[in-house]
């Protein structure tokens, strides 16, 4: 892989692709030379170039592929280097013209490592199988091999149960599976890909990780692809002194420290955000409408600790240990069974934002969503809309009439949505709000539901290309820095904010916490992948990859003014309870859009391939 | 002179929730944080009377200085 001047000679890096035709069962292997640095870095930087070559008018069509790939550092000994990526045109993200938007979704766990260690960098699943199958990716005597196997025995199982069933057959493998939500793809567009962790396989407890955003699990379901098994021997890269230094620097960086365990002096993961945002009454409550009260404080870590045993755990060999798993306490005080993973997004979106404040109930809701294999952000945010609608229309409520805090009825909604019985919810909040005619408080941008950061604080959501906080790093800017001028927001979106997506190319977690052009990243690429890329070249490649994604949105018909906006409640009815500056008006957004497009558009020219070439 | 210091999340767990604190006039926020025994890299946001403030700013008698840890999400 090593070549001195990668920036001017990306074709010297070659990756291994397998194309699987799910309709015929045939597989084709190819050595693909990289076209550019985005290809070299990998992840969505590579997959979006494949997607851009296709003319896709609806997500559920045979020509829309599921692309599974890795980043340059996946499978290396650089800390967190285990990401795998699922890309395709999303059933959930859709433009006003009805065309789907391109998406990627990513997760950790040990699946990415095992996949990379089969010798493959990318698998493109084409067409659809007429019977349920799983794909077995394995290393063979002469290189990687791929087989499709019948998956009838997996039908109807939760994502975790599918993983455990496959584990019986393949004890050396790791797994990516869909849950009942993905199987019910026609009525559920928010199916996640559930990925196994070492802890999960060892304990039998559902400690999976999720590639949740954009319904990539539903797309797998449409293709009748219920799971992917990555079977390879462990190929742990030798930890050289240089790699050890990189890992030490990752752990010591202030950026990752905030995600490290509270017991070790770290910030305790994203959970800590709740307490910080509450200082400004900016924690989503009752469909993103904080009331300025203390309701959310029952979900502070100290409160939850009274009831549950909190264990910080990690993916394979990761020292950041960002998972907060909650266990019930037995009567004698010992640790009981796993209750749920507890991080900021699910905690808020199934807790305060649904008006549910008892930790045990929040745990149960998260747990159900996870088992059914749905994206917690999309489901939580769509249900909060339903509850809001029902509160506004007590005499003509939607579905079972659930309102904020109605735990039993919310449970029903989750179960029914996950099993394909409530398409009204499981096709997402954009479609639902268009049906009800009440779009002002439907919390999505471009059809993707908003994560647990108020849109009132983040106009950057407009320019996120794959989910609000994963692809535009401005979601905390107002709370952190108080900045609210047009100049500051233009600058943030067009420079640092978009670089957030760089981690979704290189195979590391964002929780490494340093900028993508940081010396730590340059050294990691050099020491672990043997590839020298200057910081400015990394930054330029990430920028091009982001802008290609944006160009692809416009080509799929997203309207550059009407769809690059926020839910209108933010502008028309600002929340007086939030103590941060209220600066988002229609005029502000109009001016911001104009400024941002004027920076981006000239750079977007020529980034999309001419189809068919 | 006296100010009130409020700490949040991991900072609160390291030290205290809220305390009256003696400082010298003209003492900058960076120096107050140091005096509190907190690592500057652990503090992400400083508020003075609820408004964002910088390391080099000074405070007045009776001000409320809130210190928030670094935040991040995903
Ligand atoms: S940072 Fe968290 S999600 Fe990422 S590899 Fe480490 S433990 Fe896993």
Image (cartoon, rainbow, N blue to C red):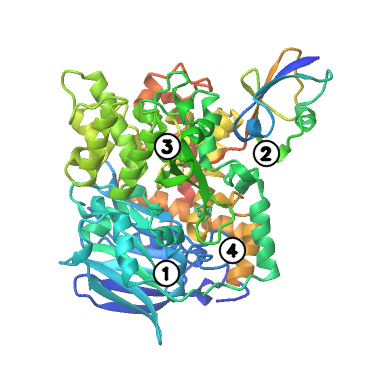
User: How far separated are the C-alphas under marks 1 and 3?
Assistant: 30 Å
Residue at figure coordinates x 37%, y 76% from the top left: A138
Q: Mark 4 lies on which chain?
A: A
Dot 1 or dot 3, earlier in sequence: 1
Q: Quadrant of the N terminus of chain A?
A: bottom right
Between marks 4 and 3, how big is the CA–CA gap? 29 Å
First along the sequence among labels 4 and 1:
4
Distance from disc 4 to disc 1, alpha carbons, whole Å, reads 16 Å
Asked whether A113 or A556 is in front, the reply is A113
| Residue A279: quadrant of the picture | top right
Of residues A56 and A510, the one drawn nearer to the viewer in this rendering: A510
Same chain, labels 4 and 1: yes
The disc label shown at residue A115, or none: 1
Estimate the spatial distance between the alpha carbons at disc 1 and disc 2, rounded to whole Å: 37 Å
Residue toward you, A354 or B59: A354
Are marks 1 and 2 in one subunit?
Answer: no
Q: Please determine whether, in this image, residue A535 is positioned above or below residue B69.
A: below
Q: Do labels 1 and 3 share a chain?
A: yes
Q: Mark 2 points at which residue?
A: B42
A76 horizontally vs A552: left or right: right
Mark 3 — residue? A347
Quadrant in the picture for the C terminus of chain A: bottom left
The answer for how far apart the CA atoms under marks 3 and 2 are is 24 Å
Q: Position of residue A154 (x, y in %)?
A: 23, 62
Q: Report the number of discs.
A: 4
Residue at 29% across / 35% down in the picture?
A: A382
- Asked if labels 3 and 1 touch by Cβ distance under 8 angstroms, the answer is no
In the picture of the structure, the residue carrying the numbered disc 4 is A78
User: What chain is tagged by disc 2?
Assistant: B
Question: x%, y% of residue A111?
Answer: 42, 64
Q: What element carries label 2?
A: helix
Q: Marks 2 and 3: in contact by CB < 8 Å?
A: no
């Amino acid at each position: 892989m090593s070549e001195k001047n990668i920036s001017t000679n990306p074709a010297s890096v070659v990756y291994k692709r397998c194309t699987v035709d799910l309709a015929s069962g045939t597989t084709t292997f190819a050595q693909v030379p990289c076209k550019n640095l985005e290809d070299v870095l990998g992840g969505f930087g590579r997959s979006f170039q494949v997607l851009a070559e296709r003319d896709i008018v609806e997500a559920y069509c045979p020509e829309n592929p599921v692309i599974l790939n890795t980043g340059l550092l996946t499978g290396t000994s650089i800390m967190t280097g285990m990401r795998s990526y699922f890309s395709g045109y999303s059933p959930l993200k859709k433009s006003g013209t009805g065309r789907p938007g391109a998406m990627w979704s990513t997760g950790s766990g040990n699946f990415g490592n095992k996949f990379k260690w089969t010798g493959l960098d990318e698998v493109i699943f084409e067409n659809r199988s007429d019977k349920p199958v799983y794909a077995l990716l394995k290393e063979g005597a002469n290189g990687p091999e791929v087989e499709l196997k019948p998956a009838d025995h997996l039908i109807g199982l939760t994502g975790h149960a599918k993983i455990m069933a496959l584990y019986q057959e393949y004890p050396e493998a790791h797994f990516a599976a869909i849950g009942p939500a993905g199987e019910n793809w026609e009525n559920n567009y928010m199916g996640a890909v559930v990925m196994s962790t070492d802890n999960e396989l060892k304990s039998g407890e559902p400690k999976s990780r999720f590639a949740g955003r954009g319904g990539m699990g539903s797309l797998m379901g449409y293709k009748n692809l219920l799971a992917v098994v990555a079977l390879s021997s462990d190929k742990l890269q030798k930890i050289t002194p240089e790699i050890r230094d990189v890992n030490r620097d990752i752990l010591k960086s202030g950026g990752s420290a905030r995600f490290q365990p509270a017991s070790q002096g770290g910030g305790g993961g994203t959970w800590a955000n709740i307490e910080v945002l509450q200082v400004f009454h900016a924690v989503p409550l009752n469909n993103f409408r904080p009331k300025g009260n203390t309701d959310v404080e029952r979900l502070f870590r100290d409160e939850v600790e009274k009831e549950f045993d909190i264990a910080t755990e990690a993916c394979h060999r990761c020292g950041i240990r960002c998972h907060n798993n909650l266990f019930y306490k037995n009567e004698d005080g010992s640790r009981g069974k796993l209750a749920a993973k507890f991080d900021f997004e699910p905690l808020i979106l199934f807790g305060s934002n649904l008006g549910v404040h008892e930790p045990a109930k929040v745990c149960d809701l998260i747990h159900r969503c996870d088992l059914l294999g749905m994206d917690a952000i999309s489901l939580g945010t769509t249900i909060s809309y339903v509850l809001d609608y029902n509160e506004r229309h007590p005499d003509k409520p939607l579905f079972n009439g659930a309102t904020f805090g109605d735990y039993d009825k919310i449970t029903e909604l989750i179960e029914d949505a996950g099993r394909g019985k409530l398409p009204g919810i499981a096709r997402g909040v954009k479609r639902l709000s268009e049906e009800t005619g009440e779009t002002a408080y439907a919390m999505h941008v471009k059809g993707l539901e908003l994560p647990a950061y108020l849109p009132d604080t983040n106009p950057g959501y407009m320019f996120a290309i794959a989910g609000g906080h994963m692809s535009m790093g401005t979601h905390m800017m107002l709370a952190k820095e108080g900045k609210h001028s047009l100049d500051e927001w233009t600058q943030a979106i067009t420079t640092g904010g978009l670089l957030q997506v760089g981690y979704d190319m290189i195979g590391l977690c964002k929780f490494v916490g340093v900028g993508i052009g940081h010396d730590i990243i340059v050294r990691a690429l050099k020491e672990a992948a043997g590839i020298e890329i200057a910081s400015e070249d990394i930054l330029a490649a990430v920028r091009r990859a982001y802008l290609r994604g944006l160009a692809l949105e416009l080509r799929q018909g997203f309207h550059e003014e009407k769809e690059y906006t926020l839910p209108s409640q933010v502008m028309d009815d600002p929340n007086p309870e939030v103590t941060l500056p209220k600066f988002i008006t229609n005029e502000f957004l109009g001016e911001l859009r104009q400024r941002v497009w004027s920076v981006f558009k000239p750079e977007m020219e020529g980034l999309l391939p001419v189809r068919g070439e | 002179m006296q100010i009130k210091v409020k700490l949040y999340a991991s900072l609160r767990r390291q030290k205290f929730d809220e305390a009256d604190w003696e400082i010298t006039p003209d003492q900058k926020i960076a120096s107050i944080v140091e005096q509190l025994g907190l690592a500057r890299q652990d503090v992400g946001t400083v508020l003075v009377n609820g408004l964002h403030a910088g390391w080099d700013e000074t405070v007045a008698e009776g001000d409320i200085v809130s210190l928030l840890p670094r935040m991040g999400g995903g």
